[in-house]
Image (cartoon, rainbow, N blue to C red):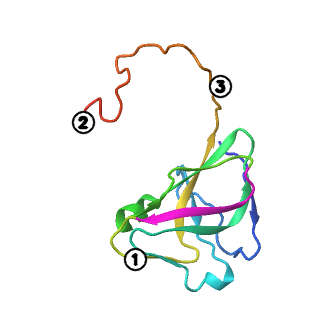
Amino acid sequence: MSVAIKIQWLEGADPEIKLPSYETEHAAGGDVRANFPPEMRDQGVVLEPGARALIPTGFAMEIPPGYEVQVRPRSGLALKHGISMVNTPGTIDADYRGPVGILLINHGQASFHVTHGERIGQMIVAPVVQGDYTVVESLTDTVRGAGGFGSTGRK
């Protein structure tokens, strides 16, 4: 199944950088790449340990109503370099039309250089179900009840 996502290059974007793409046949996420403006392409961005930066993708998009795009870290960058996203998963709503950026953070112990065209995250297209929130006097009982964080044990 596929859903049409319209992409618009932003002014100054490098159209030679691939659009989000599925790198294997059964990939759930389309890899998204850094697309720096011309004045930043040579140097990219260096993320020092603990630092975060909004990395441009060079595009805006139109997501059909009833869907969202979730932006998630790439597991290889997380394992090898400690690179993740501050708000993971990030949500891009169907009514947003602005620039798409990936908010990276360096949880590693060494500097990490984000280069022009580098795969920095992945985008998942997902259906949206909106809740109908209602105030009630009581909630149904369950075995778990109000037990939260760690209440079900470790093993």
Q: Distance between the residues labelled 3 and 2?
A: 34 Å
Using the image, determine if residue 82 lies above or below residue 153.
Answer: below
Q: What residue span does the magenta drawing correspond to?
A: 96-106
Q: What element carries label 2?
A: loop
Q: Within the magenta stretch, is there residue 127?
A: no
- Residue type at tag 3: Asp
Q: In this rendering, would 40 be left or right of 13? A: left
Residues packed near mark 3 inside 10 Å, few (<14), some (14 to 19) or many (20 plus): few
- Mark 1 = which residue? 111
Q: In this rendering, would 69 be left or right of 76? A: right
**Horizontal and vertical percent position of residue 62:** 75, 52
Q: Of helix, strand and loop, which mostly describes the magenta segment?
A: strand
- Mark 3 = which residue? 132
**Horizontal and vertical percent position of residue 74:** 47, 59
Q: Within the magenta stretch, is there residue 104?
A: yes
Q: Distance between the residues labelled 1 and 3?
A: 45 Å
- Residue type at tag 1: Ser
Work out which quarter of the rendered image holds the N terminus and state it.
Answer: top right
- Mark 2 = which residue? 154
N-terminal of the pair, mark 3 or mark 2, is 3
**Horizontal and vertical percent position of residue 23:** 54, 60
Q: In this rendering, would 109 be left or right of 24? A: left
Residue drawn at x 25%, y 32% is: 153
